[in-house]
Structure formats: structure tokens, C-alpha cells
Amino acid sequence: MSINLLKGQKIDLTKGSKNLTKLVVGLGWDPVKTESSGFLGSLFGSSTNNIDCDASVLMLNEQGKLPSQNHVVYFGNLSSACESVKHAGDNLTGEGEGDDEQISISLDRVPSSVHKLLFIVNIYDCENRKQEFGMIQNAYIRIQDASTGSELLKFNLTDNFKGLTSLVTGEIYRHNNEWKFNAIGDGTKDKSLSSILSKYI
């Protein structure tokens, strides 16, 4: 049975579930529909903004830092060197039902030096396109048991993110030899993934 989390809530993933080693992390969002006006609007109805959101995973050490650039998994680097984190690929529009991007996690293959997996979503080329998260709705992060397909938890990001261009959605982290999830849901004004990464170097 899936658990709906609120911002700031933490939940045990592996405690009492020793066989849970493979996860699918799904991230989703929809562009806000805007009503077209005039004659064309009556013909074609509403339109949507083409917003390219990108999900990334930062594999952080105990100090909360990136050991190397290879510890970032995103559309330009779809797998970590250890193959514990794999990105399914880029969704360019956010259109359609279900997850827009998915990331597979093999907890048993995450190196002992990695203590936290931080999940980021940012808007590609947001400055030139003049786009921000006020133009996005229905954003969420959810976690499935990869072996059964059952949803373990879901966190809907319901804050007002107007004017913000990156989201720190949540993190999977080690605690007393177990893995937990923390629902973060914070927005930032970082204009690119590089800007975000500079905070963890």
C-alpha cells in the first residue's frame, strides 16, 4: 500500500524489508494549460507550453559532496560507473500520463562511499526560454518496488514554485545500515544543472 508523504516527512524503505534492493524512482510533471483566446482559441481550445524538465541524481558522500562528476546521473550520463543508478532517458515535453522520467536504483550496488542519492529536477535552457516552475503543475516523486511494480510512496510537490527554476524533490539516504527517503520539495533559482552541482563540490 502506497504512502502519501508531506514535505519534510521521512520514511524507512528497507527496515523490515530486507529483500527490497531494486527501486524505480518516477518523477512527473505537467505543463500548465493556457487558454487560447479569439477565433483560433475556439477552434483549438487550450494550449500547453513546451517545457523540457530534466531529472538528475546526485550521488553524495557522507559530507554531502560529489566525489566526482561521474557521480551525477542525468540525460547526458545515463548510468553511474557502478551501475547502481540508471536513468531511463529524457522526456522533452512532460506531456502524457504517468511518470515523465524514471530512474532505477540498485541499493545493493550503491558504493559504501555514497551516503545519499539526491533527486533534482531543473528546466532545460530556462533562461533563454523564459520558463520557470510556476508554469508546471502536478509535480511529484514516487518510489516503486522494481521486483513487484507496487508503489511504496508518493510525494506531491504542491508548494508555489513561481519564479523558481530547479526543484530538490527528495533524497534516499543511509541511516543505521538502512535506507530511508526524505521528502524535501524545495525550489531554487539555479538556472542550470551546473549551477546546482557547484553547491556540492
Image: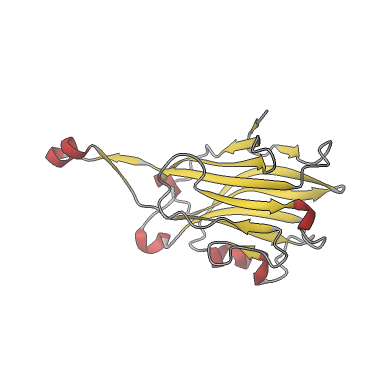
Q: Report the residue that reaches farthest toward the front.
A: 147
In the rendered structure, the answer to whether residue 176 lies left or right of residue 121 reads right
Q: Quadrant of residue 70?
A: bottom right
Residue 201 seen anywhere in this rendered image of the structure: no
Quadrant where the N terminus sits is top right
Q: Report the residue that reaches farthest toward the top.
A: 1
Residue 86 seen anywhere in this rendered image of the structure: yes
Q: Residue at x 64, y 41 (%)?
A: 143
Q: Residue at x 42, y 63 (%)?
A: 125
Q: Residue at x 64, y 52 (%)?
A: 104
Residue 168 pos. (x, y %): 59, 51
- Looking at the image, is 62 positioned above or below residue 22? below
Say which of 160 and 12 sits in front: 12
Residue 167 pos. (x, y %): 55, 51
Say which of 193 and 100 sits in front: 100
Q: Report the residue that reaches farthest toward the right.
A: 176
Residue 151 pos. (x, y %): 64, 35
Q: Residue at x 58, y 66 (%)?
A: 77
